[in-house]
Image: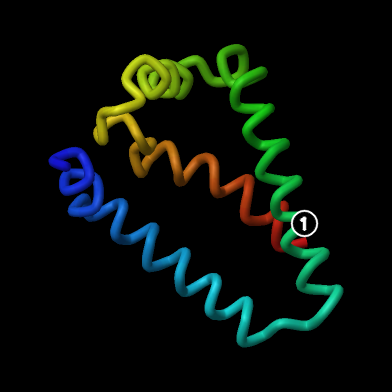
Amino acid sequence: MSHYREFYTSPVIRFIAVMSLLGALLTCLHFDGYVTILALFFGALVYAFAEYVVHRYLPKLVPALYWRHVEHHKHPQELKYLFSPVYHDVLIYSAYIPLVWL
Protein backbone atom coordinates (compact mmCIF):
# COMPACT_ATOMS: atom_id res chain seq x y z
CA MET A 1 0.00 0.00 0.00
CA SER A 2 2.93 2.38 0.60
CA HIS A 3 3.78 2.33 -3.12
CA TYR A 4 0.29 3.63 -3.94
CA ARG A 5 0.58 6.37 -1.34
CA GLU A 6 4.00 7.41 -2.65
CA PHE A 7 2.73 7.38 -6.24
CA TYR A 8 -0.50 9.30 -5.72
CA THR A 9 1.02 11.91 -3.40
CA SER A 10 3.65 12.89 -5.96
CA PRO A 11 3.00 16.43 -7.26
CA VAL A 12 3.86 15.34 -10.81
CA ILE A 13 1.32 12.49 -10.71
CA ARG A 14 -1.33 14.79 -9.29
CA PHE A 15 -0.67 17.37 -12.01
CA ILE A 16 -0.91 14.75 -14.76
CA ALA A 17 -4.11 13.34 -13.24
CA VAL A 18 -5.71 16.80 -13.11
CA MET A 19 -4.62 17.59 -16.68
CA SER A 20 -5.95 14.21 -17.89
CA LEU A 21 -9.31 14.76 -16.22
CA LEU A 22 -9.48 18.29 -17.60
CA GLY A 23 -8.64 17.00 -21.09
CA ALA A 24 -11.31 14.31 -20.86
CA LEU A 25 -13.86 16.85 -19.63
CA LEU A 26 -13.06 19.32 -22.42
CA THR A 27 -13.21 16.50 -24.97
CA CYS A 28 -16.69 15.56 -23.75
CA LEU A 29 -17.90 19.18 -23.62
CA HIS A 30 -16.64 19.99 -27.13
CA PHE A 31 -17.36 16.64 -28.74
CA ASP A 32 -17.80 17.12 -32.48
CA GLY A 33 -18.57 13.64 -33.75
CA TYR A 34 -16.14 12.21 -36.27
CA VAL A 35 -13.78 15.18 -36.01
CA THR A 36 -13.15 14.47 -32.32
CA ILE A 37 -12.79 10.74 -32.90
CA LEU A 38 -10.30 11.35 -35.72
CA ALA A 39 -8.36 13.81 -33.56
CA LEU A 40 -8.12 11.26 -30.73
CA PHE A 41 -7.02 8.57 -33.19
CA PHE A 42 -4.43 10.90 -34.74
CA GLY A 43 -3.15 11.79 -31.27
CA ALA A 44 -2.68 8.10 -30.47
CA LEU A 45 -0.77 7.62 -33.74
CA VAL A 46 1.48 10.61 -33.04
CA TYR A 47 2.16 9.27 -29.53
CA ALA A 48 3.02 5.80 -30.86
CA PHE A 49 5.32 7.30 -33.49
CA ALA A 50 7.01 9.52 -30.89
CA GLU A 51 7.65 6.49 -28.67
CA TYR A 52 9.16 4.65 -31.61
CA VAL A 53 11.44 7.58 -32.46
CA VAL A 54 12.57 7.93 -28.84
CA HIS A 55 13.47 4.26 -28.55
CA ARG A 56 14.97 3.95 -32.02
CA TYR A 57 16.74 7.23 -32.80
CA LEU A 58 17.24 9.20 -29.58
CA PRO A 59 20.52 7.43 -28.67
CA LYS A 60 22.05 8.53 -31.96
CA LEU A 61 20.48 11.99 -32.22
CA VAL A 62 20.75 13.27 -28.63
CA PRO A 63 22.83 10.94 -26.43
CA ALA A 64 22.63 13.35 -23.47
CA LEU A 65 18.85 12.89 -23.31
CA TYR A 66 19.04 9.15 -23.83
CA TRP A 67 20.92 8.27 -20.65
CA ARG A 68 17.98 9.53 -18.62
CA HIS A 69 15.64 7.37 -20.67
CA VAL A 70 17.83 4.33 -19.99
CA GLU A 71 17.60 5.01 -16.25
CA HIS A 72 13.80 5.07 -16.60
CA HIS A 73 13.89 1.52 -17.98
CA LYS A 74 16.43 0.31 -15.41
CA HIS A 75 14.35 1.63 -12.47
CA PRO A 76 10.70 1.55 -13.58
CA GLN A 77 9.37 1.48 -10.00
CA GLU A 78 11.17 4.63 -8.82
CA LEU A 79 9.30 7.93 -9.13
CA LYS A 80 12.41 10.00 -9.74
CA TYR A 81 12.98 8.12 -13.01
CA LEU A 82 9.32 7.94 -14.06
CA PHE A 83 9.27 11.31 -15.83
CA SER A 84 11.92 13.30 -17.61
CA PRO A 85 13.31 16.55 -16.19
CA VAL A 86 11.63 19.79 -17.25
CA TYR A 87 14.54 20.88 -19.47
CA HIS A 88 14.18 17.63 -21.45
CA ASP A 89 10.45 18.19 -21.80
CA VAL A 90 10.96 21.72 -23.13
CA LEU A 91 13.15 20.36 -25.93
CA ILE A 92 10.74 17.56 -26.75
CA TYR A 93 7.56 19.65 -26.64
CA SER A 94 9.11 22.44 -28.71
CA ALA A 95 9.00 19.96 -31.60
CA TYR A 96 5.87 18.03 -30.55
CA ILE A 97 3.42 20.92 -30.06
CA PRO A 98 3.94 22.52 -33.50
CA LEU A 99 3.50 19.11 -35.10
CA VAL A 100 0.21 18.46 -33.29
CA TRP A 101 -1.00 22.07 -33.74
CA LEU A 102 -1.13 21.54 -37.51
Residue at the limit of the structure toward the right, as seen here? 34
Residue at the limit of the structure toward the left, as seen here? 2
Write the residue at 61% across / 87% down: 29
Q: Name the residue nearer the viewer: 23 or 61.
A: 23
Q: How is the image coloured?
A: rainbow
Q: Quadrant of the C terminus?
A: bottom right
Residue 93 screen position, x and y as percent = 54, 48
Q: Name the residue nearer the viewer: 48 or 5.
A: 5
Residue at the limit of the structure toward the bottom, as seen here? 29
Write the residue at 26% across / 29% down: 78
**Residue type at the position of mark 1:** Phe
Residue 75 screen position, x and y as percent = 32, 20
Left or right: where 33 falls relative to 50:
right
Residue 1 screen position, x and y as percent = 17, 42
**Across the whole image, how many numbered discs are drawn on residues?**
1
Picture quadrant of residue 62:
top right
Left or right: where 16 falls relative to 26:
left
Residue 71's place in the image compared with 101, above or below, is above
Write the residue at 62% across / 81% down: 28
Left or right: where 21 falls relative to 35:
left
Question: Which residue is label 1 attached to?
Answer: 41
- Mark 1 closeness class: few <14, some 14–19, many ≥20 residues within 10 Å: few
Picture quadrant of residue 92:
top right
Residue 39's place in the image compared with 63, above or below, is below
Residue 43 screen position, x and y as percent = 71, 54
Picture quadrant of residue 88:
top left
Secondary structure of the residue carrying numbered label 1: helix
